[in-house]
Amino acid sequence: MTAHQPEPLRLHVRDLKKHYPIRTGVFSRVTNHVRAVDGISFDLRAGETLAIVGESGCGKSTAGQTILRLLRPTSGLIELSGEDISDCGERTLRPLRQKMQMIFQDPYASLNPRKTIGAAVAEPLTTHRIASGSELTDRVEQLFEKVGLRPEQMSGYPHQFSGGQRQRVAIARAIAVQPSLVICDEPVSALDISIQAQIINLMMDIQADIDLSLLFISHDLAVVELIADRIAVMYLGVFAEVGTKEEIFRNPQHPYTKALLSAVPLPDPKLRSREKIVLAGDVPSPSNPPSGCRFHTRCPLAKDKCRNIVPPLRTGKTGHAVACHLVEGF
């Protein structure tokens, strides 16, 4: 019997950084940098969903846009299916756009109000010269049916549809070119909670059908629990903890992860209790991150070592990784 072979590597990211220069004075000299993403590394395999979670301003959306090369990285490595896209020009990048797509937080803002939704879904197919004429119409109709919309709705405009319907259009557009990677940037946070579950289930069904890898960016751990295989907890531009969904929810190690989980509402508080952890202060500025552990200014357990020495992201035997001086033998 042959050993089980792991799924092929879809995305390989190493020490990715995205810094924005701060210019001051008459001559606009660079005096500092906003360290939005400050050295993250991870792998994503075929058919897998990795969720990046954290508070607003932690850098997760910037990370997604940089990986997709909507933003040019300051430094680091991005490999898509073995091909280095870290620093390639637009001419090289253009044909690779077919392999990677994005679903944005606000479906209305991401759709052209002057175009019908049928034209919006057809656009990537024509841009990449995949289909035209009657074949194009057939492909768009099939995509509409796949995401739970009726083909006769193709002539409608974005303002005529609900938020959930518009997000279905955005999903149809993202999968139209059959990508291998889709980055989802808070794709359900603008939707009613009853619609969120429908969209999450739709994305999971599509992922199973077309062997899609998802990078799911969210601040909502309750949503992440439904869809993620692995979770990376991000704080101030770096990863605090990375593990499987089960490890993060059942055996969180980093104090920041525990604080995030304590804020997740319980379906029935009578069945189980959870200690509420209230963090002191605000998230520090990414232009002037704290020395040592970046979380130490808000951590109730911080020691002198935490204030002075940057904790490495140490990986345990199961692959569970934690960046905390106070965690040992996990």
Image (cartoon, rainbow, N blue to C red):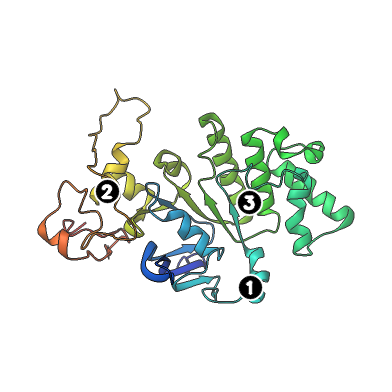
Q: Amino acid at mark 2?
A: Tyr
Residue 191 in the image: x percent, y percent? 55, 35
Q: Going by the picture, which residue comes out furthest to the right?
A: 134
Question: According to the image, label 3 marks what residue?
Answer: 209
Dot 3 or dot 1, earlier in sequence: 1
Q: Which quadrant would residue 234 be assigned to in this image?
A: bottom left
Left or right of 324 in this view: 221: right
Dot 1 or dot 2, earlier in sequence: 1
Question: According to the image, label 1 marks what residue?
Answer: 90
Q: Quick one: label 3, few (<14), some, or many (20+) residues within 10 Å?
A: few
Residue at (35% x, 36% y) in the render? 264
* Foreground residue among 96 and 284: 284
The C terminus sits in image quarter = bottom left
In whole angstroms, how far apart are the C-alphas of marks 1 and 2? 38 Å
Which secondary structure, mark 2?
A: helix
In whole angstroms, how far apart are the C-alphas of marks 3 and 1? 31 Å
Residue 1 in the image: x percent, y percent? 47, 68
Question: According to the image, label 2 marks what residue?
Answer: 256
Q: Which quadrant would residue 199 be assigned to in this image?
A: top right
Which secondary structure, mark 3?
A: helix
Which secondary structure, mark 1?
A: helix
Left or right of 188 in this view: 289: left
